[in-house]
Image (spheres, coloured by chain):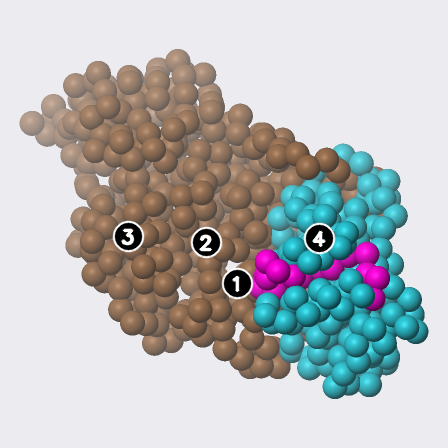
Amino acid sequence: MEDHEFGFRTRALHAGTPPDPATGARAMPIYLSSSFVFDSTEHAAELFALRTYGNIYSRIGNPTVAAFEERMASLEGGLGGVATASGLSAQLSAVLSIAQAGDHIVSAASLYGGTVTQFTVTLKRMGIDCTLVPGDDIAAFAAAVRPHTKLIFTETIGNPLGNIADLSALARVAHDAAIPLVVDNTFATPALCRPIEWGADIVTNSATKFIGGHGTVIGGIIVESGKFPWAAGKHPLLSEPSPGYHDMNFAETFGEFAFLMRARAEVLRDVGACLSPMNAWLLLQGLETLPLRMRAHVENARAIAAFLRERDEVAWINYAELDDSPYRALAQRYLPQGAGAIFTFGLRGGREAGRAFIEALELWSHLANVGDAKSLVIHPASTTHQQLTDSEMTAAGVTPEMVRLSVGLEDVADLIWDLENGLRAARAAAAVRA
Amino acid sequence: MILTTPSQRRDLLARSRTVAMVGASPNVIRPSYFVFSYLRTRGTLEVTPINPAVQDIDGVTAYPTLAAYAAERGAPDIVDVFRKASDAPQVAREAIAAGAKAIWFQYGVVNDEAIRLADEAGLDVVVDRCIKVESARFDGGLSVGGHNSGVISSRRAASRVTT
């Protein structure tokens, strides 16, 4: 091994997957085994005490899943990863690794609707309070921090508003309060933005989206930087004796690995939201082409935005690639290769025009997902964000006329042809209404 | 020589056989016990506790000092240091006297005088690293745990290992 810094595309193909030592298989094998035999009773004891590395049971760790974890950790620039059953379980596991009943978190308000309810309903039932603040108001994050606040959360690119988080500024606010910045990087992926390079401490991704990339499996991942001072005392779950592990102090025993070890050995072990090896294998396949796909996704999204911008039926577009976006400067700083391929626009004619538009589409799939190789469309107010209260919906930036696009990899002329049909239908619906 | 790159640490581990662990603890939740137990059960390095307060750890005879170890067992390949940073220069002097080939200062054991003493005496020096983590980086252990080993290779493991 030479001391060489490998590039992103090389790591997307190779990190975590040297040839299988047992067989020489070049592709990562799918280790579809629930459990793994011990070499001896002593080996078993060492494994259960977390003193040596190895596989016990696939809820806690699995070779194929570990390959995905290592590759994601490499791409995000972190110390390690813990894969989970979904993006939402990645977020939940990240929070539960450092917060408990009586604690508090602060989050940007413009989030995926499922995250808002996880934070404001489910975490609240578990005794963890959440304050949502406007994502652009850095001072509001600082003002919302309480003595028991354990983390600050944001999405790199907000869903569905398309707002770009000022990651460096948020990291400063978090670190001034001795707490970590947790960033969900799903819409950007590490191909376009690596939040750890901007000061984030923990990154979550819904791997279901661009990472898998083909709309197949559900999965999630937490990556941690290894740089946060967990031993400092602000996070007793990591710096005080753990009754779940013979009163071991994770920060003292594992140093920089404290968070990752607790996320796996206690939270993943006890919550049970693990990733299937089968799914991990598909996500590894997806990662191999992530850098190439993200470039093509962005290219198509820019062309679609340019097309929509010239159309009378379109009232507004929220896409940080556009010159008049309030997030243009932040996008140029944090997402220089492109502000992703998911954006929203408003149709003149409100809800009726939106309905007519979506129903007239032939090629774009109407469904509740993003980040597929195929182009997707949805009306957030009646679907992904419908469970929110009116004020939460306003805070999340969801309006009745809003349509969200996830631009895929088809021929862009075909995508535009289909959108033209949709816009014609929307114009007709708006005319009837007028 | 101060070893700073991954391949230097890998090569040091590959050419070493014996580790004298200064400050090894029999307390099963102490970091030094984790590292001792890992090295002992893994078996590729022969680890010995240096601790005047204990007879043995898990059946491995302890020596009270590095000098006592060297008198009976010869010079250790690596002296691994689990002591507070202010004690490090004294440990470095003892390691030099014992003829150690390398000294490994664990996480947080950072002392410029100790580093200089060992370096000037010709020892290989590793600073602020964990010998368990670095072993696991190159033998696949970190990867099993989903950690970022930094290792990229298309060679099968048997031919990658230099031992």
- Colour chain B is painted in: cyan
Query: Are discs 1 and 3 located on one and the same chain?
Result: yes
Query: Are discs 4 and 1 located on one and the same chain?
Result: no
Nearest to the eye among marks 4 and 2: give it.
4
Question: The N terminus of chain A lies in which quarter of the figure?
Answer: top right
Q: Residue at x 44, y 57 (%)?
A: A91
Q: Residues within 10 Å of mark 2 (few under 14, many from 20)?
A: many
Q: Going by the image, does A385 lie left or right of A271?
A: left
Amino acid residing under circle 2: Ile
Q: Which residue is mark 4?
A: B119
Amino acid residing under circle 4: Asp
Up-down relation of residue A78 to residue A231 (above or below): above
Q: Which residues are magenta?
A: B98-114
User: In the image, which lettered chain appears brown?
Assistant: A
Gap in angstroms between the C-alphas marked 4 and 1:
34 Å
Amino acid residing under circle 1: Phe
Gap in angstroms between the C-alphas marked 3 and 4:
51 Å
Q: Which residue is mark 2?
A: A202
Amino acid residing under circle 3: Ala
Q: Which residue is mark 3?
A: A108
Is label 4 in a helix, a strand or a loop? helix
**Residue B63 sits in quarter:** bottom right
Q: Is residue A51 magenta?
A: no
Is label 1 in a helix, a strand or a loop? helix
Q: Which residue is mark 1?
A: A259
Is label 2 in a helix, a strand or a loop? strand
User: Could you tell which of marks 3 and 2 lies nearer the N-terminus?
Assistant: 3
The answer to whether the residues at label 4 and label 1 have Cβ atoms under 8 Å apart is no
